[in-house]
Image (cartoon, grey):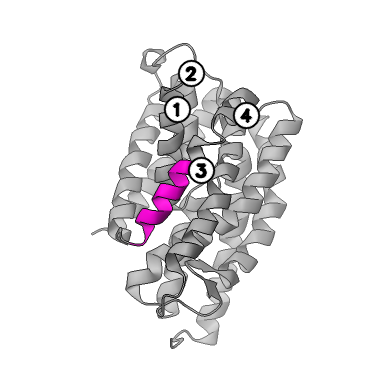
């Protein structure tokens, strides 16, 4: 493929990717998310500058985002685990259903359109944001998270939708846990572990789904672009522990409002891209 970006544009994109990496690491630590909601649109714009074919542009952005989330989620998860904040029983119950959802999503990834992905994500993000910002005790679905089979089904859905969107699952996992009365700090910490369960098999799935596609940009393994990974990961991994420290200083309501406002911004961004 032909690269159409100028040197100045490439430098600007490099700076933007570094900033996106730092922001994604901060968000991973504070909210237990992998930062994909930030990374995907930045990577997508980078691929526009580089002249990557539109038919694979969104898929490469999502697959590369999942690869970037791997080390960020790992570092965030272990940092929260050292503080004893992770619900390990729930995490262990997700070990099979979440990756199964990821596998199904990887199979679907090659055929679903980028516009459909953005629309689904915008709708889910806005619904979750309204729940957090307009928090009411009566919105809880129960006093504790139910067992199987409903837990396994939810785990599979978290893995499925998160993989299609290129996110670490923190948005959905946080909402699921808080709807059943779990503290937001525990939800944040556990979500970082779910991000590990999603991102690792998700990367493998997106490599497989895009393998051999002639429209891929240079230095790509399937739908995962190695240049994007190498630029964003260092900044993301270095900043993640700072986000963890911030998360344990803020109150529950501050975390809820901050996370809700963040989701509103993301939902608007994706909705505008569909116009």
Quadrant location of the N terminus? bottom left
Q: Which residue is mark 2?
A: 145
Please tell me which residue is depicted at 48% across the width and 63% down the height of the picture.
208
Q: Are marks 2 and 1 in contact (CB under 8 Å)?
A: yes
Query: In terms of depth relative to the viewer, which is nearer, 73 or 203?
Result: 203
Secondary structure mostly seen in magenta is: helix
Q: Quadrant of residue 29?
A: top right
Gap in Å between the C-alphas at discs 4 and 2?
24 Å
Crowdedness near tag 3: few (<14), some (14–19) or many (≥20) residues, C-alpha within 10 Å:
many
Asked if one can make out residue 169 in the rendered structure from this viewpoint, the answer is no
Q: Secondary structure at mark 1?
A: helix
Crowdedness near tag 2: few (<14), some (14–19) or many (≥20) residues, C-alpha within 10 Å:
some
Q: Secondary structure at mark 4?
A: loop
Q: Which mark is residue 176?
A: 1
Q: What range is drawn magenta here? A: 100-110
Q: Nearer the viewer, mark 2 or mark 1?
A: 2
Q: Secondary structure at mark 2?
A: loop
Q: Which mark is residue 99?
A: 3
Q: Which mark is residue 250?
A: 4
């Amino acid at each position: 493929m032909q690269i159409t970006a100028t040197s100045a544009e490439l430098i600007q994109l490099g700076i933007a990717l570094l900033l996106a990496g730092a922001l994604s690491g901060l968000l991973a630590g504070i909210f237990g998310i992998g930062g994909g909601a930030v990374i995907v649109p930045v990577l997508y714009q980078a691929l526009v500058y580089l002249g990557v074919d539109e038919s694979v542009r969104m898929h490469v952005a999502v697959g590369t985002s999942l690869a970037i989330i791997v080390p960020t989620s790992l570092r965030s998860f272990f940092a929260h685990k050292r503080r004893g904040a992770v619900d390990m029983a729930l995490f262990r119950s997700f070990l099979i259903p979440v990756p199964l959802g990821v596998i199904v999503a990887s199979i679907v990834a090659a055929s679903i359109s980028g516009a459909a992905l953005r629309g689904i994500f915008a709708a889910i993000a806005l619904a979750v944001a309204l729940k957090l910002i307009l928090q009411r005790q009566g919105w809880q679905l129960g006093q504790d998270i139910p067992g199987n089979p409903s837990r396994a089904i939810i785990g599979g859905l978290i893995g499925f939708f998160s993989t299609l969107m290129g996110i670490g699952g923190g948005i959905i996992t946080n909402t699921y846990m808080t709807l059943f009365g779990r503290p937001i700090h525990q939800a944040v910490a556990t979500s970082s572990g779910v991000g590990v369960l999603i991102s690792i098999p998700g990367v493998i799935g997106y490599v497989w789904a895009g393998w051999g596609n002639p429209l891929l940009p240079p230095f790509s393994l399937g739908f995962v672009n190695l240049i994007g990974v190498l630029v964003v990961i260092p900044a993301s991994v270095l900043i993640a522990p700072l986000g963890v420290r911030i998360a344990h200083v803020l109150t529950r309501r501050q975390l809820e409002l901050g996370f809700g406002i963040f989701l509103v911004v993301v939902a608007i961004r994706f909705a505008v891209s569909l116009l």
